[in-house]
Image: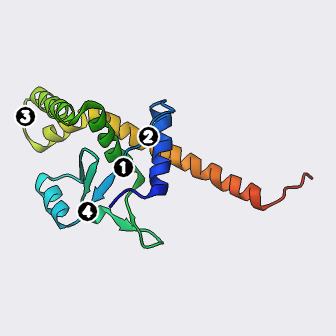
Amino acid sequence: MKLAADSHEVLEEFFREYFKDENFHLPPIYFYGGRFTRIFTNLIKVYGITIGSRIFIMPHLISVNSKNKPRLSESLAAHEITHSLQYKKHGFIGFFYNYLGSYLRNLRKKEKWDLPARQAAYLEIPFEIEARDAAEKFVQWNSERRITQEFTELDNRQEFKET
């Protein structure tokens, strides 16, 4: 599924501000959530994984909105799209090499290979830190944008009188 045009525009506007780059253009983004994705994400035990501009999401995390269209949480979408942009910036090999190298260095520092050590090593990967930061800021930014839009829409529909 290709990211919907209206969502693409909103995310492009956010990332333009986030990166402070008025010429930023969000490339086409594709989401997958079918049978293969379910097997793949369950096998590697992740909610989602990004490979280039293709984002594979555990199917149960994709819901349906009131218009019967597939929907993904804002936070997860922004997080995975950030990874897609990191791939674009560093190239496939550069991103993968740095991501995996960082994970292994972090894990080695833990001196354990148990689940808590692996999770901590994952959370300390710089690409993950940036993706969580972008996701958190996007949710806040989009919330403020919606509030502003609602006030603007109200202002356009009603005439206010000073008393």
Of the residues under marks 3 and 2, which one precedes in the sequence? Answer: 2
Q: CA distance from mark 4 to mark 3?
A: 33 Å
Q: CA distance from mark 4 to mark 1?
A: 17 Å
Q: Residue 112, labelled with which disc? A: 3
Q: Residue at x 50, y 35 (%)?
A: 17
Measured as percent of width and height from the top left, residue 3 is found at 38, 56
Badge 4 element: loop
Q: Residue 28, labelled with which disc? A: 1
Q: Residue at x 13, y 62 (%)?
A: 39
Of the residues under marks 4 and 1, which one precedes in the sequence? Answer: 1
Measured as percent of width and height from the top left, residue 75 is found at 39, 49
Q: CA distance from mark 3 to mark 2?
A: 42 Å
What residue is shown with label 4? 33
Would you say the residues marked 1 and 2 are in contact, meaning their CB atoms lie under 8 Å apart? no
User: Is 86 drawn above or below residue 38 in the view shown?
Assistant: above
Q: Amino acid at mark 4?
A: Gly
Measured as percent of width and height from the top left, residue 93 is found at 16, 34
Q: CA distance from mark 1 to mark 2?
A: 9 Å
Q: Residue at x 18, y 63 (%)?
A: 38
Would you say the residues marked 1 and 3 are in contact, meaning their CB atoms lie under 8 Å apart? no
160 with respect to 1 (left or right): right
Of the residues under marks 1 and 3, which one precedes in the sequence? Answer: 1
In this view, the mark in front (4 or 3)? 4
Q: Amino acid at mark 1?
A: Pro
